[in-house]
Amino acid sequence: MKRIILLLVLIAAATTVSAQISASFTEIDGKVEVRAPGAAEWVAAEPGMVVEEATMIATGFNASAVLRMGESLVRVQQLTRMEFEGILEQEDAVETRLNLNVGRMSAQVRSTDGRAQNFQVRSPISTAAVRGTDFEYDGEQVTVSQGQVVLVNQNNQQQPVAAGQQSTTTGSEPPTPPAREAVENATTNTAPIGAGSSEERDDAPPPSVPVAPPAPRPTRGTIVVEIN
């Protein structure tokens, strides 16, 4: 009887332990590379490739990638470097963590089987809390196409941003009052200093492209998405 009880306890415990799941690429357009945790080399990304925890993703000029993370989709836009820190799936919640180093990303965050979503894109200057939304983010500016965002700077000054609006913060300054603009027309200069392996080499020749990418600027800020 004791063995049966112990077995039932172990089974019950196993069902409540969280499990980590991964993301995968669904679309690749142009030069997109990944660097596995602990690896020195960048390799080309391909549709269907599973992205491991702590993998760095880099996109080149005029390149982009789409990742599926549960029911959510994340588009990594050109000249972006972003780390996929991991997804933690629990019985009642799904936690997703990204680290946007430079560039721009957008996301469609959706609930998975009715579970709460905690979706975070981090960088050191600001925080934006979002509920059930589609948004675009470059570390300083949040543009919302659906739902509502609360943009918070490092001094804990807050600014709600509704669908069709955008707000910006540099970290120390208060977030700007939300401006209503067409979401598809919102643009920000977000080019990194090199977006992949070849761009990072000091001896690498400059890329042969008809138009030079915009000047470098690091991202600053954090997006936190929670769907209950």
Image: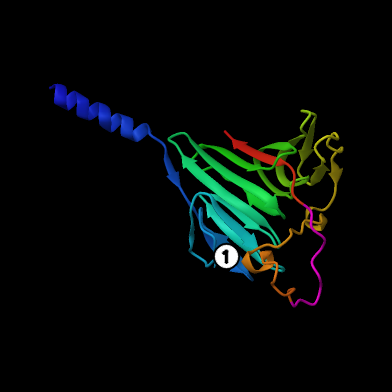
Report whether 189 appears left or right of 14. Answer: right
The picture places residue 154, in percent across and down from the top left corner, at 76, 32
Query: Given the image, on which type of amino acid does mark 1 rest?
Result: Glu
Residue 18, quarter of the rendered image: top left
Front in this rendered view, residue 154 or 177: 154
The picture places residue 215, in percent across and down from the top left corner, at 82, 60
Report whether 16 appears left or right of 136. Answer: left
Residue at 85% x, 50% y is 181
The picture places residue 105, in percent across and down from the top left corner, at 68, 53
Front in this rendered view, residue 220 or 21: 220
Instruction: Look at the numbered disc 1 and give the secondary structure of its residue.
Output: strand
Residue 208, quarter of the rendered image: bottom right
Q: Which residues are magenta?
A: 208-217
For label 1, the residue is 27
Judge whether residue 210 is colored magenta.
Answer: yes
Quick one: which residue is furthest to the top in this view?
2
Residue at 59% x, 67% y is 28
Judge whether residue 99 is colored magenta.
Answer: no
Relative height, residue 144 to residue 196 (above, below): above
Quadrant of the drawing holding the C terminus: top right
Q: Main secondary structure of the magenta part?
A: loop
Front in this rendered view, residue 62 or 142: 62
Residue at 12% x, 22% y is 1
Quick one: which residue is furthest to the left in this view?
1
Report whether 97 appears left or right of 167. Answer: left
Front in this rendered view, residue 35 or 64: 35
Residue at 19% x, 24% y is 5
